[in-house]
Image (tube, rainbow, N blue to C red):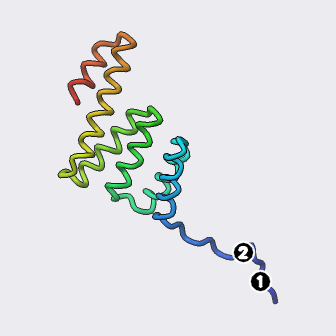
Amino acid sequence: MSQDRDMQPEKPLDAAKLVKAGDTEVAASNYDAAIEYYSQALALTPDDHQLLNKRGVAFLLAQRWREAIADFTQAIKLKPEQPDYKNNLLYAHLQIGYTYEQLNNYPGAIDDYTAA
């Protein structure tokens, strides 16, 4: 009896390959695609602080500030001595504050400038 080739189990995803694909997408300015690859890799390695930072940077580049803040905050919890993560978090708060300021939402701006 022959086996159906479509019935073979899928190969497990490789986090390193997903990260490399995400890096390639960031280099091509395809930030949403990069975020998707990084998210898939994080599903496999949820406590990878470097990967959280990479996805946070992709969120920053896509101007998805709040999601960037969430990733940087988690990366800092996992690796508090890493200064780059704190700098990235600061930058995200400054961007949100600036956006609020441009919209004349001064209380919102103050909140994020203060958080920075």
Q: Residues within 10 Å of mark 1 (few under 14, many from 20)?
A: few
Of residues 8 and 110, the one nearer the viewer is 110
Quick check: 21 left or right of 77?
right
Q: Is residue 90 above or below residue 40?
A: above
Quick check: 99 left or right of 26?
left
The quadrant of the image that shows the C terminus is top left
| Residue 7, label in figure | 2
* Residue occupying the point 39% across, 13% down: 103
Of residues 45 and 22, the one nearer the viewer is 22
* Residue occupying the point 24% across, 50% down: 77
Secondary structure type for disc 1: loop
The image shows residue 57 at horizontal and vertical percentages of 39, 43
Q: Quadrant of residue 71?
A: top left
| Residue assigned mark 1 | 3
Q: Are marks 1 and 2 in contact (CB under 8 Å)?
A: yes
The image shows residue 25 at horizontal and vertical percentages of 53, 48
Quick check: 20 left or right of 105?
right
Dot 2 amino acid type: Met
